[in-house]
Image (cartoon, coloured by chain):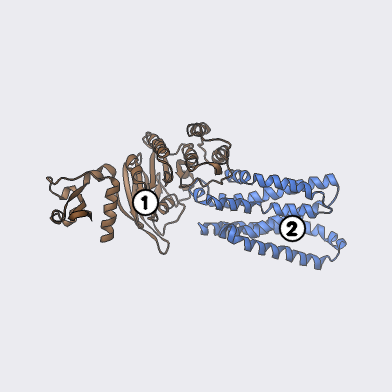
């Protein structure tokens, strides 16, 4: 079963539109949704969670259509962490726990208390006095304590310092040790997603430019570094993007299958692949 | 819905402590003015809760949690009724202790607060507290002003007002029930449109 399926989703807001979005996240995997600010990552998440109605197309989560009346119940199995906690800031961690206990039928107070202890979060301090890292940890604790099968994380790691980010990524990794647990995580910090994800989906100006297995992406592409003349000798369709360097040099992202095997290529990072593809898309 | 009401109570708890203090002060006013004021003021508490929700963008998270639109809308009505109901009970208790006022005045003020809630909440849910506030004040002004003019015409002195009280005590709950029955479906539609 797929944890998430978006089929031909379109949603227009006048100057911005999500266009013909198709995205599938198989159950048991982690999918990273990458894109610049305003690319449509949060809108995509709102569409798949049924918080926004698409103009056309269908969204389903854990096998249930997001526009169906039963979907409210399916949200019990989805842990959501947005870019902020979004709880009224006068609440404290204990009160958040009680509200969540009334919200989720599968709420596990022991798991929540364990998370608060593990994250070293004070129980009675209003979370308006929390640091950003503590606030996000509280939101993560709440999302993990009702036995979710799917975690939907929208910029949950942005604004966190590298140590806390690493800690949080480890928690997400632990979550997916259960084979039916899945994660959709949106971020513009590509290095985080590279560490964590099985799949990378890349949104650019409301369009999904690709959704690929991370390892396959890294195997399929290589970075060519050479002179402009050497670059010109490559097949145009082999070059996904290129940039000029000093002294007439060129750096290009190429499809390995379309260039001679003898050509020396560097292994790209996901971030490089995305940057090259964006530049290539903009030139086209 | 219980979770949403619990959240609002936690958020309003500080305000409620001030409210309880005000109740104690107003109980010592002569006549029923203090009680009426408190009951109607309590019906405004859902707007404070809505303002807190807007400030932290609670709706964005709540839309992804297992709350239906119906839960989100009804919880604000129930919160208003509970607050106005609690204030009414306290006012009745104070009347009994101080032996002043008429219980029907409290009943009418409770009905008035339910009417005000029924008229103004749809605006708040559609436009938000900031933009809905002007509409709310306009509605309160029209309802209270209209009621005042009608009362003045029907009962120019207190003796006449007392004579009208039994009829008002019947008409008040009917008006509150009818307005609420219309208001909830309207609020549900407007809230869905906002999302």
- The residue labelled by disc 2 is B172
Q: Which residue is label 1 attached to?
A: A6
The percent position of residue B103, horizontal first and vertical second, equals 81, 51
> As rendered, which of A41 and A160 lies closer to the eye?
A160
Q: Nearer the viewer, residue A97 or A48?
A: A97
Q: Is residue A70 visible?
A: no
Query: Along the horizontal axis of the image, is A277 left or right of B113?
Result: left
Q: Residue at x 43, y 62 (%)?
A: A13
Where does residue A250 sit, x and y in percent of width and height? 19, 53
Judging from the image, mark 2 belongs to the subunit labelled B
Query: Which chain appears blue?
Result: B
Badge nearest the viewer, 2 or 1: 1
Question: Can I make out residue B99 in this image?
Answer: yes
Seen from the viewer's position, the closer of residues A18 and A72 is: A18
Residue A194: x, y in percent?
32, 42
B29 horizontally vs A284: left or right: right
Q: Is residue A247 left or right of residue B30?
A: left
- What kind of element bears circle 1? strand
Q: Which chain does brown denote in the image?
A: A
- Which of A159/B114 is in front? A159
Q: Chain of mark 1?
A: A
Percent x, y of residue A19:
35, 59
Residue at the far front in the pictured view: A247
**Is disc 2 in contact with disc 1, using a CB cutoff of under 8 Å?**
no
Do discs 2 and 1 share a chain? no
Task: State how many labels appear.
Answer: 2
Q: Residues within 10 Å of mark 2 (few under 14, many from 20)?
A: many
In the figure, residue A163 lies in which quadrant? top left
């Amino acid at each position: 079963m797929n944890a998430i399926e978006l089929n031909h989703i379109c949603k227009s807001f006048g100057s911005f539109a999500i266009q013909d979005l198709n995205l599938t996240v198989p159950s048991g995997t982690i999918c990273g949704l990458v894109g610049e600010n305003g690319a449509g990552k949060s809108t995509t998440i709102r569409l798949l969670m049924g918080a926004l109605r698409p103009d056309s197309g269908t969204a389903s989560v854990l096998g249930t259509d997001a526009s169906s009346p039963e979907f409210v119940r399916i949200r019990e199995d989805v842990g959501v962490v947005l870019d902020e906690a979004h709880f009224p800031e006068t609440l404290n961690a204990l009160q958040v726990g009680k509200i969540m206990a009334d919200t989720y039928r599968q709420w596990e107070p022991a798991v929540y208390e364990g998370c608060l202890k593990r994250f070293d979060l004070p129980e009675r301090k209003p979370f308006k006095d929390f640091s950003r890292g503590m606030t996000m940890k509280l939101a993560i604790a709440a999302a993990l304590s009702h036995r979710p099968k799917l975690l939907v994380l929208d910029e949950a790691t942005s604004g966190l310092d590298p140590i806390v980010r690493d800690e949080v990524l480890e928690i997400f990794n632990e979550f997916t040790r259960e084979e039916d647990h899945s994660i959709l995580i949106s971020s513009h910090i590509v290095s985080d997603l590279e560490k964590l994800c099985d799949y990378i989906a890349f949104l650019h100006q409301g369009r999904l430019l690709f959704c690929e297995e991370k390892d396959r992406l890294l195997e399929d592409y290589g970075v060519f570094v050479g002179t402009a003349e050497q670059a010109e000798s490559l097949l145009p369709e082999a070059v996904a993007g290129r940039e000029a360097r000093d002294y007439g040099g060129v750096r290009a992202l190429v499809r390995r299958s379309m260039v001679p095997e003898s050509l020396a290529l560097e292994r790209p990072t996901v971030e490089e692949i995305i940057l090259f593809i964006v530049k290539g898309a903009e030139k086209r | 819905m219980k979770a949403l009401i619990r959240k609002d109570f936690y958020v309003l708890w500080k305000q409620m402590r001030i409210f309880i203090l005000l109740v104690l002060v107003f109980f010592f006013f002569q006549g029923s003015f203090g009680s009426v004021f408190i009951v109607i003021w309590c019906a405004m508490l859902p707007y404070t809760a809505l303002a807190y929700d807007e400030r932290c963008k609670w709706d964005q998270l709540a839309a992804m949690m297992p709350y239906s639109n119906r839960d989100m809308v009804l919880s604000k009505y129930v919160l208003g009724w509970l607050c106005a109901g609690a204030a009414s009970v306290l006012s009745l208790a104070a009347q009994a202790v101080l032996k002043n006022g008429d219980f029907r005045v409290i009943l009418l003020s409770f009905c008035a607060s339910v009417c005000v809630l029924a008229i103004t909440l749809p605006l708040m849910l559609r436009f938000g507290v900031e933009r809905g506030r002007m509409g709310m004040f306009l509605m309160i002004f029209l309802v209270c002003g209209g009621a005042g003019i009608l009362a003045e015409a029907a009962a120019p002195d207190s003796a006449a007002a007392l004579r009208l009280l039994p009829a008002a005590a019947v008409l008040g709950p009917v008006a509150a029930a009818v307005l609420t029955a219309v208001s909830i479906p309207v609020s549900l539609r407007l809230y869905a449109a906002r999302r």
